[in-house]
Image (cartoon, rainbow, N blue to C red):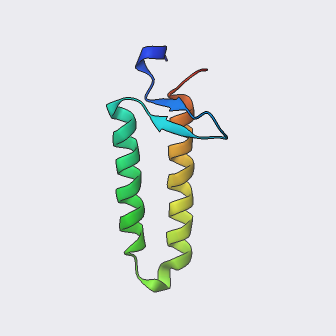
Amino acid sequence: MDEEDAWFVRGRIGYSFLPARWPGWVVIAGYVVTVHLLTLLPERLTSLRWTLIAIVTVGVIVIAHRTARRT
């Protein structure tokens, strides 16, 4: 990915990413909406809820890592 096309930039401290362009913001907004909707699942599906949240979180991290600007 070209530097000017990067969706995210790496944070200065730790393993963090910040949205730099609109596709990055769409990914973050989609993540927030998805996690919110998963919290609306019935109480008896708690283990499924946490499993899906973990999968979605890993997916966002992978997307951010692959589309981040290299420093």
**Residue that appears at 59% across and 21% down:** 70
- Residue at 35 percent of width and 33 percent of height: 23
Image location of residue 52, percent across then percent down: 51, 62
Residue visible at 33% across and 41% down?
26
In the displayed structure, 31 sits above or below 12; it is below
Front-most of residues 48 and 27: 27
Q: How many labels does the image show?
A: 0
Relative to 47, does residue 64 appear above or below in the rendering? above
Residue at 55% x, 43% y is 61
Q: Residue 68: x, y in percent? A: 52, 28
Looking at the image, residue 3 sits to the left or right of residue 58; the answer is left
Q: Where is residue 41 in the image (x, y as percent from the top left)?
A: 40, 76
Residue at the outermost front position: 12
Q: Looking at the image, which residue sits at the far bottom?
A: 44
Position above or below: 37 against 57: below
Q: In which quarter of the image is the C terminus?
A: top right
- Name the spot of residue 10 as percent of width and height, x first: 56, 31
Question: Which image quadrant is residue 38 in?
Answer: bottom left
